[in-house]
Amino acid sequence: MSGSDVRGLLPPFLLLLICERPGHGYDLIERLARLGASDAEPGQVYRALRSLERAGHLASSWVASEAGPARRRYELTTGGMAELQAWMRRLIEVRQLLETCLARWTRVSQEAGGHGLPDVREETGWEEASWARR
């Protein structure tokens, strides 16, 4: 996913990662990459962390580091757990919508001879209305 695609999903991703294990910014950026959000820009991540903290979903404290300066460590609050649960409910709804959309795309593209619709319409002269009514 591109960084712009990930931006709107940073709050639930970060809440989930912090729920699994509290961490500092750079650690969370690395964990986001392992989650599949490798294009998340550090500035976006830090802005999302600050926003979540201002909203009361995260608490942070400075923790000394053996390898350098102290780092801000983020932990989930009770409100953060409630927000994470709300996000997961919304994401389940989005997943169901995406599954429906993808199933319809599979059906339509198979009906079009196994090709994607844009190519099929160009090759066969399909009218948009002929496939949009389905």
Image (cartoon, rainbow, N blue to C red):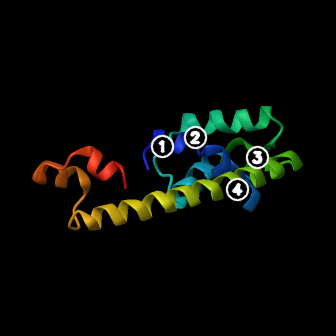
- Give the class, few, some or many, for how many residues have Cα within 10 Å of label 2's Cα (few <14, many ≥20): few
Q: Are marks 1 and 2 in contact (CB under 8 Å)?
A: yes
Q: Nearer the viewer, residue 130 or 100?
A: 130
Q: Which residue is mark 1?
A: 5
Q: Give how far apart the Cα atoms at labels 1 and 2 are.
A: 7 Å
- Mark found first going from the N terminus, 2 or 4: 2
Q: Secondary structure at mark 2?
A: loop
Residue sitting nearer the eye, 16 or 42: 16
Amino acid type at circle 3 is Tyr
Residue that carries the numbered disc 4 in the rendered image = 88
Q: Position of residue 13 (x, y in %)?
A: 63, 52
Q: Does the image show residue 66?
A: no
Mark in the foreground, 3 or 2: 2
Secondary structure of the residue carrying numbered label 4: helix
- Say whether disc 3 or disc 4 marks the residue closer to the N-terminus: 3
Q: Nearer the viewer, mark 1 or mark 3?
A: 1
Residue at figure coordinates x 18%, y 50% from the top left = 126
Mark 2 highlights which residue? 8
Asked whether, in this view, residue 123 is left or right of residue 56, the answer is left
Are the residues flagged by discs 3 and 2 in contact, CB closer than 8 Å?
A: no
Give the label on residue 64, or none: none
Report how many numbered discs are placed on residues in the image: 4
Alpha carbons under labels 1 and 3: distance apart: 24 Å
3 vs 4, front mark: 4
Check disc 3 and report the residue beneath it.
74
- The disc labelled 4 sits on which kind of residue? Met
Secondary structure at badge 3 equals: strand
Q: Residues within 10 Å of mark 3 (few under 14, many from 20)?
A: many
90 or 70, which is in the foreground? 90
Residue furthest out toward the left: 123
* Label 3 to label 4: alpha-carbon separation: 20 Å
